[in-house]
Structure formats: structure tokens, C-alpha cells
Image (tube, grey):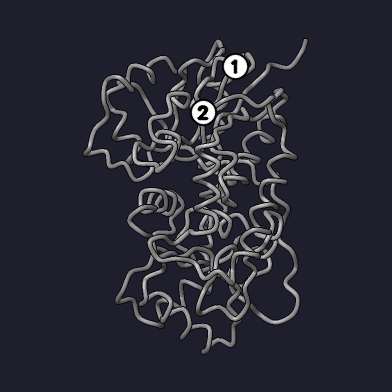
Amino acid sequence: MAARKIGVLTFHRSINYGSYWQARCLVEGLRARGLDAELLDHRSRRVEWREARNAFQPTLPVRTDPRHFAALGRKTRALIAAVDALPLSPPFPLEDPTRAPRYDTVVVGSDEVWNFRHPWYSGASIFFGEGLNTDRLVSYAASVGNHDAADGIDNHWLDRLRRFHAISVRDENSRALLTGLAREIPLVLDPCLQFPNVIPDAATPAGKRYAVVYGHSFPDWFTAQLRRWADRTNTRLVTIGYPSQIADEARIDATAADFSSLIAGACAVATNFFHGCVFAIRHNRPFVCAASPYRRNKVQDLTRILGLQDHLVAEGLSDTAFADRLAALPADLADRLATARAASTRFLDHALA
């Protein structure tokens, strides 16, 4: 019997390490389950233009120094090439999902696929299953991002989500928004943690001790405290993907594989990005995260579920406590991950049965 054909619908072409890795981990994780999975390769010139602009100007309204454009261009081209190497459907217009192939099941997620505040994907009906040629719709680790549950959701969108056979999300804010569906909506792990074997194991650190800085637009108190920690501990700061004024080395043009291996070889990670936390956890590296308002919903439930709340840091934390967060992760993290992974596996077993 031929393997069931599964389409994975997400933001796979975002110029972002996390978007690439969660798309890859989900599609390859499903293929490891014996399913014929591929990414739905939706295209939109409007979206591609916005992605390219954001890739070169990630900190707007603060403009990026043009001296970094060459490295940002290399990063962008490397990520596009990496996505092109993944299992992809024939391309079709984002605005016309009826031209996508037929699938036995379409898995929507992960990522902020239902974020009504997303600057260029907001309200794209394809992510609510509209027009897709499939017998079954499922969501895995979907999120509404920074759209606060208190702002509500129109019945127009809830009616579309009612057609889903099974729904899972990755944060409590998303679950709270969808209470109108009157069904159990479990929290599941990000694909990078659910299918960790897709990501190469940690390398043995070589050379001078370093910590990774991943993100941008950090608050001043965070960068100052991080710099003090680095100076006291004789640790080099290496920024990945974005310029940083406090870093000792810039790997702005890092490939997706470089991103993972640099975190794997680091002594610690300082971030304000969700997948900065995820990859620190995947490679068992201590981390601190200064959660921005945009990303707070993403990181607070991830850290809560895994007992890592202390690694979300705020202004006023002492330098000693800051250093403690960057020294070790909880001893029971592996057990917590195993428990969360088992729950996510049960959801997939049900949703894809």
C-alpha cells in the first residue's frame, strides 16, 4: 500500500532560521513515521518582497547599517537554497490554494499561521484550510502569535477551524483564543524538540570559549548585563544572523546548518527569539531570554512547560543570578522533554490515524 500523502502548510520561505528548521523537522519527522510528507510550496510576490525587505532591514524603524548588507544577502541566499532542498510540492499561488496538489491530510503549522497581526500573512485564508484539496485538516503547534486572546476571533474564522479534524497549538494564548471551538486543544512541542534527531547532535566545543547572541533589538539593560558577564567570564560573544554592537565576532551570514552547530558548540545562548530558546534546549545549552512583547507568548509557555521559567530574565536581575542562568539547565530537563514529547506523539497518533 502506498504511503499516505501529507502536505505541511507553514511559513517555510520566511528568511529566518527558526522557520526553516521547524518546517524541516516537521516534514522529515512525519516522513520518519512512514508518511509521504512534503511542504506546500505557496508563492506570493507580495510576500517575497516583504520578506526580502525584512531580511535586509530587520530592525525597522531603526535602519540597518549598509555595511552589513553583503552578509545579510549571503544569509538570505543560503536560507533560500536550504528551503529549495526540502521536499516541496509544485509551486502554486498563495492566493489560490485550489492549485495545490491533493493530499490525504494537510498539517497546518507550526509557526504563527493564525496570527491576525502578522505583517504580511495576516488573514491568508489558506492557513485556515480554505480551498485546500484534502480529506482531513490537522494543525500541529499552530500559534496566533502576538494576537492577544482578549482581542477575540471572529466566527468567520472559527467556522473554518471547526472543519479541522484535530487541532493542537504551542501556547496558552492560542488555546485561550480558540475556546469557542468547544473541544480539547492540547499544547504540543515545537517540531525542533518533537523531532530532535533531524537536527545534528551537539559538536564538541573547540577553541576559545564563546556564547551565542541570537536576535536583535535587545533592551539596553540586557546587552549591558551580557557584556559584563562575558568580560568577567572571559567569554567571546558571537552574534548569529544579525548585527550586534556588543559581539566580539559576527556570523551574520551563517547558514541554517551553521546556526545549529554554532549553538551546539557554545557554552551558553543569549536571545530574545523563540528558536534561540528552542535550539539552546535542543543542544542542552544554558540560556537567557529577554522576551520582547512580540515574542512573549511564544517563549513563556515553552519555558513553563519545561521548568525553565527562570531563564526568562527581566531588568533588575542581579549579575550573580544572571550568571547562574547562563551556567546550567535544570537536571530534570531531559525527563520533562520526554514527557512533553510523549504527549505530542499521542496527539499525532490520533490526528494522523
Q: Position of residue 29 (x, y in %)?
A: 67, 35
Query: What residue lies at 45% left-to-right and 30% top-to-bottom?
Result: 168
In the depicted structure, whether residue 295 falls above or below residue 194: below
Q: Which residue has dot 1 on it?
A: 99
State the quadrant of the N terminus: top right
- Residue 106: where, in percent of width, then height? 56, 21
Residue count near mark 2 (Cα–Cα under 10 Å), binned few <14, some 14–19, many ≥20: many
- Relative to 275, does residue 160 appear above or below in the rendering? above
Residue at mark 2 to residue at mark 1: CA–CA distance: 17 Å
Specify the amino acid type for callout 1.
Arg
What residue is drawn where x is 55% and y is 69%? 66
Q: Quadrant of residue 218?
A: bottom left
Q: Foreground residue, 291 or 332?
A: 291
- Pointer 2 residue: 108
Q: Residue at x 46, y 27 (%)?
A: 127
Task: Identify the residue at the far left of this view.
Answer: 150
